[in-house]
Amino acid sequence: MAIKTISIKATNSQEAASKVSEALKGFDPKLLIFFASSKYTSPAAEFEKVFPNSEIIGSTSHSEYCGSEYQSDSISVMAIDKNSVEDVCLKVVENIDNEPNIRETINEMQDYFGGEAELFQNFDYYVGIVLFESSAKAEEMFMDRLGTTTDILFVGGSSSAAESGVSQVYAGGKSYTKAAVLAMLKTVNGYDVFKTQSAHIFSERKLLVTKSDLHNRILYEFDNRPCNEVYAEVLGVPTDQIQNYFVSNPLGVVAGEEIFVRTFDQIKDGGITLHCGLPEGSEVNVLKIGNIVSDTQKVLDDIITYQPAGVINFNCLYRTLEIINENLVEPYCNLFGRYNSIGFSTGGEAFLGHINETSTILIIK
């Protein structure tokens, strides 16, 4: 088997690493990806001790998925050997809130595989994973620069944490805050990437963002009017009730048939904060969340028409909370139980930009 997935619970990181090592006895991972509850204080360091020849990346998580299981206080692990991923180049970009220039980093990653010509000629075999530490609130800028620096598609998510936990991302045996972990993979049989969101257009009315603070993710005006008034007007509800609709009626940047979701967080400083920033000049629609299970199943069935080696699901924490509230955890997880899969509840998703209330999915063939 080229890919193995494991879900474990332990009293500490050392015990967790021991359990994973035992479960993978005789298996030689080229890449180890893990999503760990923030209750584990040093999982990457302990994994590096037992897997010294593996590239290791990971993130803290509010909650974890593995196959048909949904857990909290656990660690979900995907171990990938050279039968599925021939090689990996791993880089960490720190202090992403200071808007670093990432061109040199990307050039180094591309040169590792033989340069742009090699990647272009074998484009269907190279894919990137990006894991953000979410407290930096710098994903929008970073993804924009990433998209202008390389044609390799990077997908992933932002760290989350259990209640009172510390948000971190991991590379090798180290943990990082305010950083992005980048892994460029050369797959053996190729890959697929897609996103799905159970969000549909609620109103055809286009709203123009005329005043916003992109850095702090605060929206102030639609169409030169207070955004709270316009949002309430579109929904047909009193202004003092709009916070009840932030999750069920997010905003969406609509590009043809694609929808990129942006969700309000809280009323603050004369505006409304967002989980993903919106620059001035953006046009958005107000959306409506539908049935997450049926919408996700349709997309999975349409795209995964073969038996994949592994599936990684970067699933928004809001989607997790919704399936919990609607008692849909079991049917949702059963969709991914059909595959060799892991996932976690993210603080935002990466797919051609920074988005939320979305599931971004990487399939390794």
Image (spheres, rainbow, N blue to C red):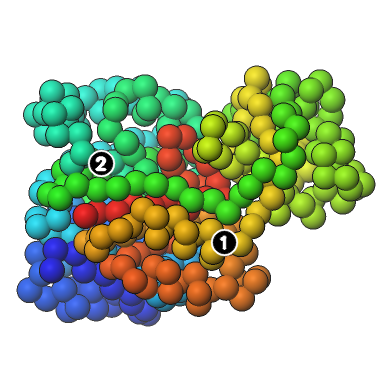
Task: Specify which label sits upstream in the sequence, 2 or 1.
Answer: 2
> Which mark is on residue 4?
none
The crowding category of the residue bearing disc 1, from other C-alpha atoms within 10 Å (few below 14, some 14 to 19, many at least 20), is many
In the rendering, at what x and y percent does residue 196 appear?
49, 51
Q: Is residue 72 left or right of residue 126?
A: right
In the rendering, at what x and y percent does residue 119 appear?
16, 30
The answer for how far apart the CA atoms under marks 2 and 1 are is: 27 Å
Dot in front, 2 or 1 = 1
Quarter of the figure with the C terminus: bottom left
Visible in this render: residue 79? no
In the rendering, at what x and y percent does residue 279 appear?
62, 25
Q: Which quadrant of the structure image shows residue 12?
A: bottom left
Q: Amino acid at mark 1?
A: Ile
Q: Is residue 348 left or right of residue 11?
A: right
Q: Give yes or no for contact between labels 2 and 1 (Cβ–Cβ under 8 Å).
A: no
In the rendering, at what x and y percent does residue 60 appear?
42, 58
In the image, residue 39 above or below residue 230 = below
Taking the spot 50% from the left edge, 77% from the top edge, the residue there is 330
Residue at mark 1? 292
Q: Which quadrant of the structure image shows residue 260?
A: top right
The crowding category of the residue bearing disc 2, from other C-alpha atoms within 10 Å (few below 14, some 14 to 19, many at least 20), is many
Taking the spot 52% from the left edge, 55% from the top edge, the residue there is 316
**Element on which disc 1 rests:** helix
In the image, residue 217 above or below residue 330 = above
Q: Is residue 179 left or right of residue 189?
A: right
- For this rendering, which residue is in front, 194 or 89? 194
Q: Amino acid at mark 2?
A: Val
> Which mark is on residue 127?
2
Taking the spot 39% from the left edge, 47% from the top edge, the residue there is 194
